[in-house]
Amino acid sequence: MRALLVIDVQNTIVNLKDFQQELEGMEGIIKDFKERTEPVLFIRNISEDENSPFYKDSSGSALHESLMDYAEIIVEKKTPSAFFQTNLSNLLEKMNVNHIFITGFNTEFCCQFTAIAAYDRGYQVTFIENATGTVNDEDTYEMPGLDIRDFVGTYLHWSDVIEVLDIDEYKEEYK
């Protein structure tokens, strides 16, 4: 069985810049999974620190309204990996999931860490590159011309263990 992970689509991230294209791509994939009655799990980053933008009781840590209505299953995490010290593995095992699709924020942190952790746990992993987004850019990393999504997608693809697709390739392959 396949499952979709929608990682950290939270106000504190989504409200930082225009992610309309990424959100629309995620929503299309969510609808595909829902139509096939395949599980969609939302991952929510939380913190116990009241000064954190991800403080568990703050509006910033809440799921963004654009996709919130699709969130029937929510897994809370405190690290970049959705698997580390969470119940995600147990949920996926109960659902007989063996193939995970990755979408969400931030591409180079939580999406990447979760994809690698999923592979390490024996899952087949598909990373949908342009259904991820990041608040960071070439200036953040002092690397002029850096396209973070393309960079992460390229090296995950080169690993030969994680499938990397864009939304159109996903539709062609899995819809």
Image (spheres, rainbow, N blue to C red):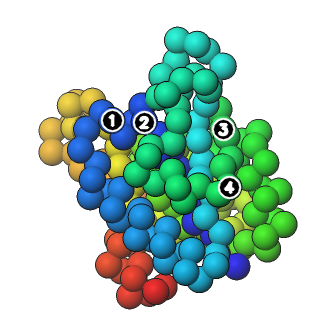
Circle number at residue 73: 4
Q: Alpha carbon of mark 3 to alpha carbon of mark 1: how far?
A: 20 Å
Callout 4–callout 2 Cβ contact below 8 Å = no
Label 4 secondary element: strand
- First of labels 3, 1 by sequence position: 1
Residue receiving disc 2? 11
| Location of mark 1 (residue) | 15
Whether tag 4 and tag 3 are in contact, CB under 8 A, the answer is no
In primary-sequence order, the first of circles 4 and 2 is: 2
Q: Position of residue 46 (x, y in %)?
A: 61, 30
Q: Nearer the viewer, residue 34 or 77?
A: 34
Q: Indicate which disc, 4 or 1, sits on the residue closer to the N terminus.
A: 1
* Circle 3 crowding by C-alpha within 10 Å: few under 14, some 14–19, many from 20: many
Q: CA distance from mark 4 to mark 3?
A: 13 Å
Total label count?
4
- Could you tell me if the residues under marks 2 and 3 are in contact, i.e. CB atoms within 8 Å? no
